[in-house]
Image (cartoon, coloured by chain):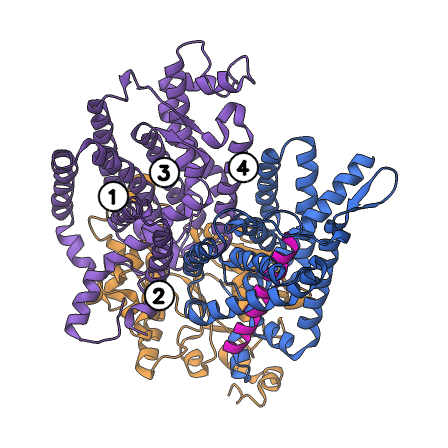
Chain colours: A purple, B orange, C blue
Amino acid sequence: MTATVTRDPAAPPATPRRRVVVSGPARAAIGFASGALLLFALAPSALSDFRLSLLAKYLCLAMVAVGIGLAWGRGGLLTLGQGVFFGLGGYAMAMHMKLADAGPGELPDFMALYGQLDALPWWWRPFASPWFALPATVLLPMLVAFLLGSLVFRRRVRGAYFAILSQALAAALVIFLIGQQGTTGGTNGLTDFQGFFGYDLDDPVNQRMVYFIVAGGLLLLLALARQLMHSRYGELLVAVRDGEERVRFLGHNPATVKLVAYVVAAGMAGLAGALFVPAVGIINPALIGVVPSIEFVVGVAVGGRAVLLGPVLGAVAVAWARTSLSEEFPAAWTYLQGLLFVLVVAFLPGGLASLPALARRLRRTPRQEVGT
Amino acid sequence: MTGLEIRGLRVSFDGFVAVDGVDLTVAPGDIRFLIGPNGAGKTTLVDAVTGLVKATGSVRFGDHELLGRPVHRIARLGVGRTFQTSSVFEGLTVLQNLDIAAGAGRGAWTMARRRRTVPVAVSEALETIGLAGRQDALAGTLAHGHKQWLEIGMLLVQNVDLLLLDEPVAGMSHEERDATGALLAAISAARTVVVIEHDMDFMRSFARTVTVLHAGRVLSEGTVAQVQADPRVQEVYLGTGGVA
Amino acid sequence: MTVLVGQLFTGVSIGAVLLLIALGLSLTFGQMGVINMAHGEFIMAGAYTVYVLQGAISSAGISLFVALPVAFLVAGALGALLEYLLIRRLYARPLDTLLVTWGVSLILQQLARDIFGAPNVQTRAPDWLTGNVPLFGDLTLSTNRLFILALAILAVVGLTLVLRLTPLGRRIRAVVQNRDLAAVSGIPTGRVDRLTFFIGSGLAGVAGVALTLLGPIGPTMGTNLIIDAFLVVVVGGIGTLKGGVIVAFVLGTLQSLVEYTTTLSVAKVVVFVAIVGFLQWRPQGLFTLRTRSLA
């Protein structure tokens, strides 16, 4: 066994904390500037339209990962149901786009196709207004997370119990969506969008526009997550992760602390889902169920759960590997994905983000044991 | 300063009665030691007062009834405690540990921002517990005795009126023990303190009053000398070395 | 009235399947605290055992009865191997175990696809398990559901006897209640863990055999089954079989009744809400092992 294996997986990154405190803001500014440069200047000029729209899709998945990094990496809340919030945001946006495509007073195309309905169901109606639909993409997931979270955390349901409940919610939502085919599109989900707030989605220029919105959204979420992680709240969240009962005796309510992280992560996933719809052009149950929900966590684990950028890089790397490998070698990709996941979580709990620190330590004390 | 008034306290676990009708009055500013053989119900009593286990009866702290309140509410009323095993946040620095302890009741706006300066109470506590030079060290890297002091420091900044200490000197060296005793003496100047302890030398040096618990009931109460002279206490402790 | 009774029986048979699946989990998750996401793939391994055996043994009846012990051994061996290679290194990190075993389940699913093909396959059921047993009025019960119910009851009774009466059972319970004390009392906790895992996973194999009677089998059959089964253990309570048994039948009946009045999709949501509501009342599950620890 090497030192990495016995190390607490959830321990903060190996970077000395003092350095971050001293030069934190400056480093962050440089980091965000180079991130913006990469996303807004380099990527659009270097990538073809097709590649750029793929990148937009990956960045949406990365936005979910930022939230998981906060809730799981910092707060220890293993949420296996982020697909639910991703889906709520996605469906809210998709419903609005469907209604906008159909025009005032008309039914969306798929409803007319299935022919079960004469009029729009009542719960579709508010989504016709962008003033309702846009906030709803974020607020609706946050509301669901708030309801579930406040019930569950208040009664100290935690750890594996919480993970299983969050996963069961994903399973229930998917079965529900599939069952309500007439109003939700069932297995097919919602797709075939023409416009996005009046802009034609088939136009490559507008697709680029969507990419820029996605990239901006990701940077925004990263800034938010960074602020939360470095705030007093972020410190308290780590304390709750490592000693929930002790925090209680200091006069804090851990349920509230966890609830904030869970609700924020849900809002982030909602925004990601909302941007995923115009970027990729579809939302359906297969994208938000149990398996994709776990896959969100996979990316975070591979990248490194406890550092800010780990989840983003992990999510993008895993999604990219899937696209480039799964079409040519679907079987090999599944084996690789499974194996990668087993090895990283079991033997490199800090994720790929912990590799540089590990390499530094190995260089100081050369050992042959680390084969991964 | 606020005292503690316990009346008819009863705690049972699935039929096993751990605390069986305890009456206990701790005057404001007292340093009360709770002693008794293993299984006497000392820790359970502290658990009940701090809201960790359900209990019946009454525990009054100043004007407040504590029973039935959630743990963090009791803590906010000014009741602090330590545990037998040290329980600092090992993944956080000494400073962060203290800042969290000082932070109950902070508003959302303060919580959402970075800590720019060290709160006065925290820097004072750092001096008091002698860890000022190590404020950025991870708590997990501290020696056992230092962790215990950090815990006491966390109680200090928590600004409590009543301190419940569960075996604060267990596992400490002689020097650490004396230093801890001095620390406790300083702290108790403005606070009511209840200490669970097995170390009789430590008790003799610092206790003002003593309560002996046995099988969930109060066996004897008084000054150190009175309790030591009580034949019932000697009987209970017979074979475990005796109090005297 | 007849309809209601019919729905109750449907609920009981859903419960029996749930119970068979959850029984193994109540050992590995309930007793050991390990969240094994590959449990569903052990079920699949049990199901494919029937499929393979039917290639060798032409009689569906004989192959079914041969498959029961063989599937137990196959799935149990897989479980013991998994415990030995990965899980025992992760006992201190239960949430990571969940993720690691999910990776394992991906690999096992792909293995099944490579060996048996991606499409579902159908096994043959013996003739005596394809009919219906008349109950009263025009109410009938399908024999395969009755068989599964009997199998579930048998498995519960068998497991209870093993835990209560055998030295192994005593050791398992000792390790569950106080691992450190068990270790210093001379119980080889590592071997007990492996054996517990063997039995729990073996029971998944038996559940897999039972599932071949209800429909076609495929590489991903396990994924959806285990979520419900995990819920059964969570609601039933850790460290007890009793809770799981009751909850399996209650959840099965609840789902069947709600499904009858509405639809399957609504029933799933109602069951989920009911579970969250139940946990408000008893967050530790129906029955719990009480401990005095802070955590």
- SS category of the residue bearing label 2: helix
* Region of the chain picked out in magenta, as a range: C189-212
Q: Which residue is mark 3?
A: A269
Pointers 4 and 2 within a single chain = no
Q: Which residue is mark 2?
A: B152
Q: Amino acid at mark 4?
A: Ile
Q: Nearer the viewer, residue A214 or B32?
A: A214
In this rendering, the label closer to the viewer, 1 or 4: 4
Q: Nearer the viewer, residue C70 or C14?
A: C70
How far apart marks 4 and 3 lie (CA) works out to: 20 Å
Which chain's residue wears label 3? A
Q: Which residue is mark 4?
A: A175
Q: Position of residue A224 (x, y in %)?
A: 26, 40
Disc 4: CA contacts within 10 A as few (<14), some (14-19) or many (>=20): many
Circles 1 and 4, Cβ within 8 Å, touching? The answer is no
Task: Reply yes or no: does residue C242 show up in magenta.
Answer: no
Say left or right for B28 vs C225.
left
Disc 2: CA contacts within 10 A as few (<14), some (14-19) or many (>=20): many
Q: Nearer the viewer, residue B229 or A158?
A: A158
Pointers 2 and 3 within a single chain = no
Q: Amino acid at mark 3?
A: Ala
How far apart marks 4 and 2 lie (CA) works out to: 53 Å
Say left or right for B67 vs A310.
right
